[in-house]
Image (spheres, rainbow, N blue to C red):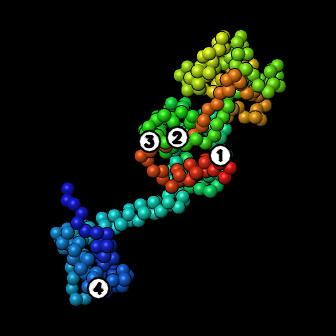
Amino acid sequence: MLRIKFDLGELQAFVVTAEKASFRLAAEALCLSPPALSRRVERLEAALGVRLLERTTRSVELTAVGQEFLHEARTALAGLDEAVQRVNDQVHLRRGRVAIACIPSVASHLLPRVLRAFAVAQPEVQVHVIDESANQVLDAVVRGDADFGLSFTGSQESALRFEALMRERYVLAMQRGHRWAGRKEVAWAELAGQRLVSVSRDSSNRLLLDQATADLPQQPVAWYECNHVAGALALVEAGLGLAVLPQLALPSEHPQVCGVPLIEPDLWRTLGLLQRRDRVLAPAAEALRQRLIQLHSGG
């Protein structure tokens, strides 16, 4: 494959000269002297090894090869103009696409209000939300499928940067009519003998919960298991048991279910932004990331 040995200015000089059929008019259009314009065209012809224009004292005409090359040159310049415009649009946040990976509780209860404000400020930026488990969020960021992630795991990954946003407490979710609903707190030891709804053992939430209850004299028993927190919450709504859930998964205005803080031990998790260390975010992705940071810094 032949290497390109001419520059953009030479290509543009040829196209304008061919369109104007005059070196003088083309030079005026490009704010060049006629000799300077002529040299650009000659350098292009030398690089291609073929004559593109036939020059006479009165006119300029395309050769057969020049006629064919003119079409390709116009297409190339138009494509470059479009590419520059797309980049400019992204830099000024007029267009773009952001992929964000997050755990389901974030997708349901935190992200919508951020995206609503983001959509007002950048209405032409598309956002793809990958709402999956914590492990899948981690994988999406590592693979580059997501620009960044929102999760509570990943701080130990050397390839990722973890930026803490907020801490949330685990609470005991129950129906509002439950006898414990009015309490300020419930000790983990009191869960012995209670019917619990739990997330599956494959969940990162479950790992935290098992670690928290490892030293209890009597282990709570999970009567029902769900793959995701949303499923566990639905079973609590149906009155099938109690569930230990992160506070974010249980809105305070929930009509049927309330949450009571668990103590002895207190259990918290830190939600943060995950980003590959070797990756610089595009302007649109960085703008969304900054909105998330401002939301939790009071900005």
Nearer-N-terminus badge (3/4): 4
Q: Position of residue 72 (x, y in %)?
A: 30, 64
| Residue underneath mark 1 | 296
Circle count: 4
Q: Give the residue type that dot 3 points to.
A: Gly
Nearer-N-terminus badge (1/3): 3
Nearer-N-terminus badge (3/2): 3
Q: Position of residue 299 (x, y in %)?
A: 66, 52
Residue at 20 percent across and 72 percent down: it is 45
Q: Position of residue 238 (x, y in %)?
A: 73, 21
Residue 144 is tagged as 3
Residue 225 visible from this viewpoint: no
Q: Give the residue type that dot 4 points to.
A: Pro
Residue 183 is tagged as none
Q: Give the residue type that dot 1 points to.
A: His
Residue 162 is tagged as 2
Residue 169 appears left or right of 80: right
Residue 179 visible from this viewpoint: yes
Mark 3 → mark 2, Cα distance in angstroms: 15 Å
Q: Quadrant of residue 193?
A: top right
Q: Residues within 10 Å of mark 2 (few under 14, many from 20)?
A: many
Nearer-N-terminus badge (2/4): 4
Task: Select label 3 or label 4 by which is in front.
Answer: 3
The answer to whether the residues at label 1 and label 3 have Cβ atoms under 8 Å apart is no
